[in-house]
């Protein structure tokens, strides 16, 4: 008994210290248990209960080339379900004639873009998109100021100053900056507190203006004749325009990866998803189509004819061949079955791995792992590992410098997320064109400086030397001052009713008055309107 126990322990230790498999993260896309392959899918057909697949040598020219790789006999005594018949011979894989001559960058990039990455960014996030934001933000702010709700003293919702393309560009720069520098509260970015002080944020715009632009950040109100009905109308037309620009800017090779990406959102949303395997367990789920090296081509459910597919399966998915899913394998064993041009295979590593493919003939080939050691793996698993890292890389880099802030409005987070994807795609094209070792963070820093309009070598000391333009007093010397505090008044600020607001039957108090006239007036519009009328 002692010898048997010692032998069992040695075998267990030998298995535990064997090389790790690089398919341990391949179960990410299986977190949605309600998805069923074969439903409403014309590309992948499984034989159902009402049909069976009969192959003869006349129907299948490769029927005489039967082949199955497994260390155990595949023709065991288990009963075969004739309603879902699978075969273990190869079928010729069609070649769709991919044109490799068109692969590459499709943008016109000048050498000046090497020091000004905004030239690449603006070819994806175009001026037309920025103007849509300007129009929608102005209408949103105007509607917000006209709401018939009571305003508190000093409320910022009573007036909205129209924005410009330059200011929206600066706003995007602050959003990108907020992804690099983490603050628990947005206003800490604009604070003079030495623990949080960051001079560039206050140099760009005030904290109050940034919060107001955040409140009005939208694209829905730019077009009065929005043709969409439903939630996507809140993203029209910017979402579609960015997707089109992604695809126009870069033509990929034939190896693409598609997987789900979860954007954290815990607000009230009908289609909010829960995926317990993700770090952000609740949120908005995207299906992203990426190149094998990370460029994002599409953000949606993507289906297209004349493409091959390779992916992993869950063992309890409906339509899986029972002779594959129920087969007990030892480590390194490989078994597969075919239904028409779809191959379902099972390989035993540290655990069972099920794979579905139309691109590769399932067979064992030598492959190097991440340590450079040769290891025998199925061809479909090797192809999956080589090509599926694209979406993981894009998600990884975007998550490091994420712009979205906590918000109850889901469409705002989606727009911020599209800004991050645009920045990542711009960096992808920049790095491929100039063949540089510039990191993604350094690229973002240069882009933020371009959006603000600062020279590339600007430092914090230079910011302190930059003096803001002082507002010149009018020629008649009528300008606002604080209302003097009366004697024995205990408070630090004294308020009076604004005489201009009183004319419009609005009771509003102000702490400012005209220094010459002595009339209490709200600084800004009321001050200007009263003096224009009385002069």
Image (cartoon, helix red, strand yellow):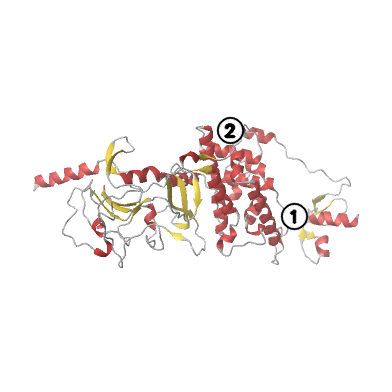
The quadrant where residue 529 appears: bottom right
Residue matched to label 1: 493
Please give left or right for residue 293 compared with residue 164 in the image: left
Residue 223: tell me if it is visible: yes
Judged from the image, the secondary structure of the residue bearing numbered disc 1 is loop
The spot of residue 523 in percent (x, y) is: 78, 53
Name the mark nearer the viewer: 2 or 1.
2
Q: Nearer the viewer, residue 71 or 503?
A: 71
Q: Which residue: 63% across, 43% down?
A: 201
Residue 155: tell me if it is visible: no
Q: Which residue: 75% across, 40% down?
A: 469
The spot of residue 418 in percent (x, y) is: 55, 50
The quadrant of the picture occupied by the C terminus is: bottom right
Residue matched to label 2: 114
Q: Nearer the viewer, residue 297 or 138?
A: 297
Please tell me whether residue 492 is drawn above or below residue 147 in the rendered image.
Answer: above
């Amino acid at each position: 008994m002692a010898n048997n126990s010692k032998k069992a322990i040695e075998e267990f230790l030998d298995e535990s210290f064997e090389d790790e498999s690089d398919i341990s993260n391949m179960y990410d896309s299986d977190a949605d248990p309600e998805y069923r392959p074969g439903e409403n899918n014309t590309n992948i057909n499984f034989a159902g209960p009402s049909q069976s697949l009969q192959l003869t040598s006349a129907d299948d020219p490769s029927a005489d080339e039967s082949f199955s790789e497994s260390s155990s006999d595949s023709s065991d005594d288990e009963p075969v379900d004739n309603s879902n018949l699978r075969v273990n011979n190869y079928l010729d894989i069609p070649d769709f004639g991919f044109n490799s001559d068109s692969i590459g960058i499709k943008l016109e990039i000048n050498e000046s873009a090497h020091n000004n990455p905004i030239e690449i960014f603006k070819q994806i996030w175009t001026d037309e998109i920025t103007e849509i934001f300007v129009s929608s933000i102005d209408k949103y702010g105007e509607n917000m100021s006209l709401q018939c709700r009571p305003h508190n003293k000093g409320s910022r919702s009573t007036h909205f100053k129209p924005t410009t393309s330059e200011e929206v560009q600066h706003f995007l720069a602050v959003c990108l900056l907020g992804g690099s520098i983490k603050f628990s509260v947005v206003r800490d970015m604009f604070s003079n507190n030495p623990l949080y002080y960051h001079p560039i944020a206050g140099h760009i715009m005030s904290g109050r203006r940034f919060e107001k632009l955040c409140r009005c950040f939208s694209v829905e109100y730019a077009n009065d004749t929005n043709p969409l009905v439903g939630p996507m109308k809140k993203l029209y037309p910017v979402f579609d325009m960015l997707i089109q620009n992604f695809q126009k800017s870069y033509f990929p090779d034939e190896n693409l990866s598609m997987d789900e990406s979860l954007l954290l959102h815990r607000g009230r949303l009908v289609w909010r998803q829960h995926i317990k395997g993700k770090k952000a367990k609740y949120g908005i789920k995207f299906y992203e189509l990426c190149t094998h090296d990370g460029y994002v081509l599409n953000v949606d459910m993507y289906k297209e004819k004349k493409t091959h597919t390779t992916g992993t399966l869950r063992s309890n998915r409906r339509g899986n061949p029972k002779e594959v899913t129920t087969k007990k394998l030892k480590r390194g064993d490989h078994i597969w079955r075919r239904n028409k041009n779809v191959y379902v295979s099972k390989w035993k590593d540290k655990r069972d791995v099920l794979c579905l493919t139309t691109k590769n003939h399932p067979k064992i080939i030598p492959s190097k792992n991440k340590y450079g050691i040769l290891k025998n793996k199925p061809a479909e698993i090797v192809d999956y590992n080589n090509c599926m890292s694209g979406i993981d890389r894009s998600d990884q880099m975007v998550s490091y410098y994420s712009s979205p802030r906590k918000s109850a409005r889901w469409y705002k987070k989606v727009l911020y997320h599209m800004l991050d994807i645009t920045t990542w795609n711009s960096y992808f094209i920049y790095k491929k064109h100039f063949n540089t070792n510039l990191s993604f963070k350094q690229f973002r820093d240069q882009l933020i400086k371009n959006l603000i309009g600062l020279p590339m070598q600007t430092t914090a000391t230079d910011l302190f030397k930059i003096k803001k333009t002082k507002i010149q007093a009018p020629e008649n010397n009528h300008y606002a001052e604080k209302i003097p505090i009366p004697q024995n008044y205990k408070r630090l600020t004294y308020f009076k009713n604004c005489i201009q607001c009183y004319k419009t039957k609005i009771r509003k108090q102000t702490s400012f008055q005209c220094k010459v006239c002595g009339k209490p007036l709200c600084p800004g519009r009321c001050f200007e309107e009263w003096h224009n009328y009385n002069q």
